[in-house]
Amino acid sequence: MRGAPGSGAERAAELRARLGRLRAEELALEAELCALEAGQADERRSQQDGLSRDEIQRYSRQLLLAEVGTGGQVRLRNSAVAVVGTGGLGSPCALYLAAMGVGTLGLVDHDTVDHSNLHRQIAHTTAACEGAARKVVSAHAALARLNPQCRVRTHDVLLESANALEILRGYDVVVDASDNAATRYLVNDACVMLGIPLVSGSAVRVDGQLTVYNYNGGPCYRCLFPAPPPAATVATCSETGVLGVVPGIIGCLQALEVVKVVTGRKEDEPPSMLLFSYKAHPHFRSIKLRGRVPTCAVCGDAPTVTGLVDYAAFCGAGPSDCPQTLDVLDDPSQRVSCREYSAAMGRPHLLLDVRDEVQFAICSLPGALNVPLDRLDERRAELQRAIGALGGAPVYVVCRRGNDSQLAVRYIRDTLGYAACYDVGRGLIGWQAEVDPEFPTY
Ligand SMILES: Nc1ncnc2c1ncn2[C@@H]1O[C@H](COP(=O)(O)OP(=O)(O)OP(=O)(O)O)[C@@H](O)[C@H]1O
Ligand SMILES: [Zn+2]
């Protein structure tokens, strides 16, 4: 409803529009600044001993703590910390590190802000998303607003074997806030080779984990996990979801560990892994870890990995948490495109949606019967009845991305013996791209 001319509602709309333009301009300036600064030679980091008047005022509540004091604050100011990933973990971690007075922060990310990031990636804003801002630019803007005294270096690149040593060299601590196995091993190996402590975190669904690796005789990531898990078993936020505050909790704890390492307060702590779960009571559990493993391939006594390797090949998946695309149907005639299904919708058929009930409740195509892939066999009689009523008309099977639907087509053809069954290729993601741009994706 539009307000009357001159009313508060009209003024609010005008102010909202003006703020939108200012936010867009801020991001454009930020992007230009990031690009300029990225091309400049690094200045020497300040290594002075004392604190300025401004610093004393800004950090006064922290200076009062025996755990920090002036000495600790100076160490924070003189430190440089790299944060790999400015997503769910990296956002709160980098914000707190900047707020607490870390002098130099390096942000590494190769991604653009997306709407589905905003419930947890709190360094980013709706305006950044609408302007398709790069994550490092958007995070730089947030850090600059929070603490202009923090020097931010942005690395708007995919961290990979070819650039990791060069990018991470010179930092005092590295924070792994990434979301995939290939990057975890890469960052671990680079930190071992460069002799940098690594504060590693992860968060999926309602659970999180935190460990400091390669520190004070403790293990590295490979000491604990010498071989990566099979790529298909790795849970990812985009597939299984994540409660917004969970990476917030772990990212804040990563910032805490950085402070302890930089201020020298962690030296007496034995290595441990902290586990968090919303479902466990109490929510936190700490597991003691053994020290460095002498046979470890990278930090052991006779390392076999002495340079960065091909981590995508090692992990069976590249540096992305996007699920792999399956192709299990032998015959392309068992698949229709989303456009072809759209054309067939007016004719008799059964649309079977094999996503789980939670996803089906988010959005679905008209008339779809929902039987999750893992319940096909249990609900076999019901399926057979529905197929029997078709009089030979086709069954189309859909899921989110077109992977599970292929497995279901196989089941219906091979186990139920119904040959007129087709996969809707690329699933609902394809439906939005090919047929209906208004259809929600998640
Ligand atoms: N090798 C890498 N180099 C640079 N950035 C990386 C690398 N690996 C992961 N990242 C970044 O780490 C961040 C991890 O964030 P997060 O786990 O919250 O998920 P996301 O990828 O942003 O979102 P979603 O998984 O929901 O699509 C991402 O911004 C991603 O781009
Ligand atoms: Zn090791």
Image: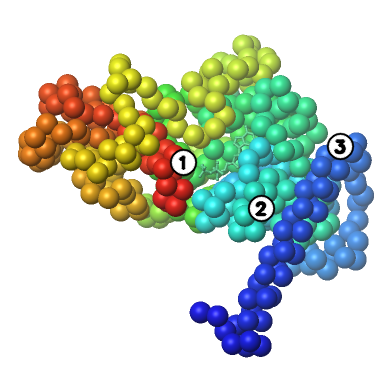
Q: Residue at x 27, y 50 (%)?
A: 366
How many numbered badges does the structure rendering display?
Answer: 3
Badge 3 or badge 2: first in the primary sequence: 3
Circle number at residue 131: 2
Which residue does the numbered mark 1 point to in the structure image? 433
Q: Amino acid at mark 2?
A: Gly
Reading the image, the residue beneath label 3 is: 39
Residue 295 position, x and y percent, is 56, 15
Mark in the foreground, 3 or 1: 1
Disc 3 + disc 2, Cβ < 8 Å: no
Is 21 on the left-hand or right-hand side of 209?
A: right
Vertical arrangement, residue 44 with respect to residue 249, above or below: above
Residue type at numbered disc 3: Gly
CA distance separating discs 3 and 2: 23 Å
Sequence-wise, the earlier of marks 1 and 2 is 2
Disc 1 residue type (three-letter): Ala
